[in-house]
Image: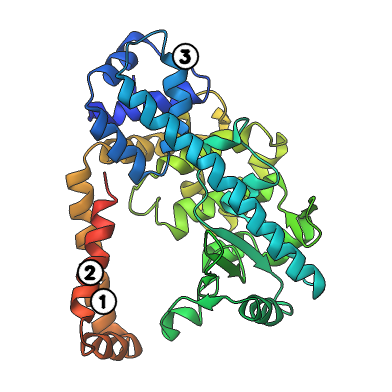
Amino acid sequence: MIPCPSGPHRAVISLLRAACGISLDPKEVQDILGSNPERIVRIAGAHVILPTLHTGLQAIVEQARLPDDMLLFFHEMQDANKRRRAAMAKQLGIISDLFAEHGITAVILKGGCELLAPAYRQPEQRFISDLDLLISPEQLPTASEVLMAAGCIQAEMAEINARTHHHLPAFLHPEWLVPVELHRGVGQDAGARILTGEQVVANAQTSDLPAIRIPSWPDRLTHLVIHAQLSDRGYPDRKIFLRHIVDLFQIAQHLPTEAWQATLEAFTREGQAPAFRSLLAETELLLPGRMPHQLIDANAERDARLAIDLLGRPGKARLREALRWTGWYLRMFLTDRERRRHYLARLRRPGEVARLIRFHRDRDRDIR
């Protein structure tokens, strides 16, 4: 049984199981039939897995009579994602040509890897938000200039954040579908030490595009865990983003056996082994069958069950997030003089309070 208190959330997880080829028991099918389709859509949208659920619905269509409009909606979502991926592949090809003209080599990161070396057997299941490209430090200024010369503008990012962030402010082009982010590394603080940009570049493999390389499968595993558990604060905040769970399940089928232990050792050296183990435990509980059981200890399973329980209590999760941000702002005001000046200057700008309220309201809506 899925250890989640919310029927609609269990329904979404059950559909993910079906999409991943995992057989459902009658209780899981009943969760799907008993859940409001609009609630399923809202949860799936917040976790960016709408195209994935279409495959799950198709897998159970003979087990359960589902509303026709629900089937049509999810079919359209996956079909639209196919067209989106084609446009993104074209955009990546243009960037590759621009970089190749200037002798620049980039490593595609995160979801963009799915355009060149898919982990998913049905690539149209994976929604890709933007294109993340890792550039070596010596080529980063030139790569930025090339994109600007091609007609891009950069999104705004406060200088106090931009100077230490692991990627530059996003590049936007009026004729390109998605933003492009040029990365200095794959994470910050412990994440930057667990897997360095230099390691990713050294281990990367060639692709069909002349200027774009693909990370090794072990590096894709390590980066996913860094992003999910550290950068996105999945581990300290007990947050689960279901797309990360599916990504790990899909990447697992491509990994050499020794990659799991090597990755654990990399996280252990930085005192982050619990973050790694807990994501494995969450994935095994939600999408069983591919995680290395020997690396999941009792503490990891306990942490995973607490995170899954919180997933099914979005009201509680929103309150925790509000308290965390309140604590962050208070701590910065009291302990960081530069950030205090930064926030006070922003609050004096016209419309800044309204913008801040919108920012947190939108984040609040994403917790479903």
Return the residue nearer the eye: 150 or 276: 150
**How far is the residue under mark 1 from the one under mark 2?**
6 Å
Q: Which tag is nearer the camera, tag 3 or tag 1?
A: 3
- The crowd level at tag 1 (other Cα within 10 Å; few <14, some 14-19, many 20+) is few
Q: Name the residue under label 3.
A: 23
Few, some or many C-alpha atoms within 10 Å of disc 2 (few <14, some 14-19, many ≥20)?
few
Tell me whether circle 3 and circle 1 mark residues in contact (CB < 8 Å).
Answer: no
The numbered mark at residue 327 is: 2
From where the camera sits, is residue 94 visible? yes
Give SS at disc 2: helix
Q: Do the residues labelled 3 and 2 touch (CB within 8 Å)?
A: no
| Residue beneath disc 1 | 331
Residue 212, compared with residue 277, is above or below; it is: below
Residue 305, placed above or below residue 117? above
Residue 249 disc label:
none
Screen quadrant of the N terminus: top left
Screen quadrant of the C terminus: top left
Asked if one can make out residue 287 in the rendered structure from this viewpoint, the answer is: no
Residue positioned 19% across, 61% down in the render: 323
Q: Which of 44 and 226 is in front in this view?
A: 44
Residue 242's image quarter? top left
Q: Is residue 84 left or right of residue 342?
A: right
Q: Give the SS element for disc 1.
A: helix
Distance (Cα) linking label 3 and label 2: 43 Å
- Residue 3 found in image quarter: top left
Q: Give x and y (percent) for residue 225.
A: 53, 49
Q: Position of residue 149 (x, y in %)?
A: 65, 81
